[in-house]
Amino acid sequence: MAYSIEKKSIPGYMMYINGGLAGMLGTCIVQPLDLVKTRMQISATTGEYKSSFDCLLKVFKNEGILALYNGLSAGLMRQATYTTARMGFYQMEIDAYRKQFNAPPTVLASMGMGILAGAFGAMFGNPAEVALIRMMSDNRLPPAERRNYTGVLNAFVRIVKDEGVITLWKGCMPTVGRAMIVNMVQLASYSQLKAAFSEYFSGLSLHIAAAMMSGLLTTIASMPLDMAKTRIQQQKTAEYKGTMDVLMKVSKNEGIASLWKGFTPYLCRLGPHTVFAFIFLEQLTKAYKHIVLGDDSESNI
C-alpha cells in the first residue's frame, strides 16, 4: 500500500520573521539613498539641492559620511514592523490561496492581496516612519529648530511626551495609501513577473530580473504618494490638510513634475531595496525549507 507524504509548510511566524529580516538587510545597503530621496523631497521649494548627486555631495561634505546613515535605527525599526507585517501577511495570503484553489494567484488576486498586506503593514510601521523622516531631515534644519533625537526609541519617547501618542500616526492615511499602492504593484508584479520570466531565467537570475522590473513599476506608481507622505510627516505647521491637498498644492505651485521630485534617488533606493529584499527573502525561505523541512522546492512567493 502506497502512502502519500504531505509536504510540511513553513510556519506562519517564520514567514513574518523572514520578511522582516529581508527588509532590514536591504535597508542596511540602501539607507544613504533613502536619505537623499527624503532631503530632495523636503527641499523641493527651496532649491537647496540641484540634483541627487549634488545632495549626496553636500551631505558628505557638510555633515560627514556617517550622516548618510542618519535615521538608520528608525529605518531598521520600520522594516522590523512594516516589512515584517506586510511580507509575512502576503506570504500567508498566497499560501492560503494555493491551498484553497490549488493554483497560483491570478493577477487580480495578487493585486488584492498586495493591497491588504500593504495596509496591514503600514498601520504597524507608521510610528517608525515618522521617526525616520524626522531623523533624516533634522540636520538640514536651523540648529535652534533641530530635534536631535539620539535614536529611534528616544524619538518615540519624546514624540509621545511632547506631542502626544497620536503624533506617532501622523500622516497615517497617506502612509497607508502609499503602502497599498506600493504593495499592490510591488508584490503582485513580482509574483507575476517571476512566473512570466521563469521560461527564460531560473534561480537567482530569475529573482533579480523580476525584482528589478517590479522596483521600476513600483517607483513610477508610488512616487507622488511618497512625496505627499514625506511633506505631511515633516511639517511643523498645518500647511497641508491631507494627501490630496499636498498633491493639488504641489502641482499648482511647483508643477506636475514636482510630484516625482527625487525620482532618481527614489528609484535607486526602491529598486535595489526591492531586489535585495526579495533575494534575501527567497534565500532565507529556501534555507529554512532545506535545513528545517528537508524540502528543496522553489518558494511560492
Image (tube, rainbow, N blue to C red):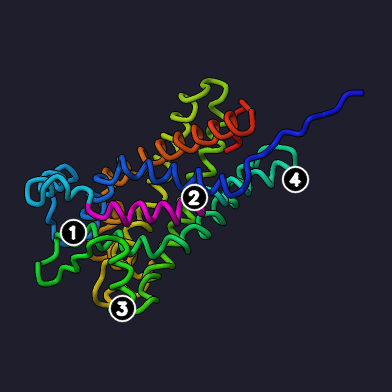
Q: Residues within 10 Å of mark 4 (few under 14, many from 20)?
A: few
User: Which callout, 3 or 4, points at the residue further toward the start of the chain?
Assistant: 4
Query: Total of numbered circles in the picture?
Result: 4
Give the spatial CA distance, label 3 vs label 4: 47 Å
Residue at far front of view: 292
Residue at the spot of label 4: 100
How would you rate the neighbour count of disc 3 (Cα within 10 Å): few for under 14, some for 14-19, many for 20 or more? few
Dividing the picture into quarters, in which one does residue 22 lie?
A: top left
Q: CA distance from mark 2 to mark 4?
A: 22 Å
Labels 2, 3: front one: 3
x, y (%) of residue 227?
32, 58
Which of the two labelled residues, at mark 4 and mark 1, occupies the earlier sequence position?
A: 1
Q: CA distance from mark 1 to mark 2?
A: 27 Å
Q: Are marks 1 and 2 in contact (CB under 8 Å)?
A: no
**Which of the two discs, 2 and 4, labels the residue nearer the N terminus?**
4
Q: Which residue is mark 3?
A: 161
Q: Amino acid at mark 4?
A: Gln
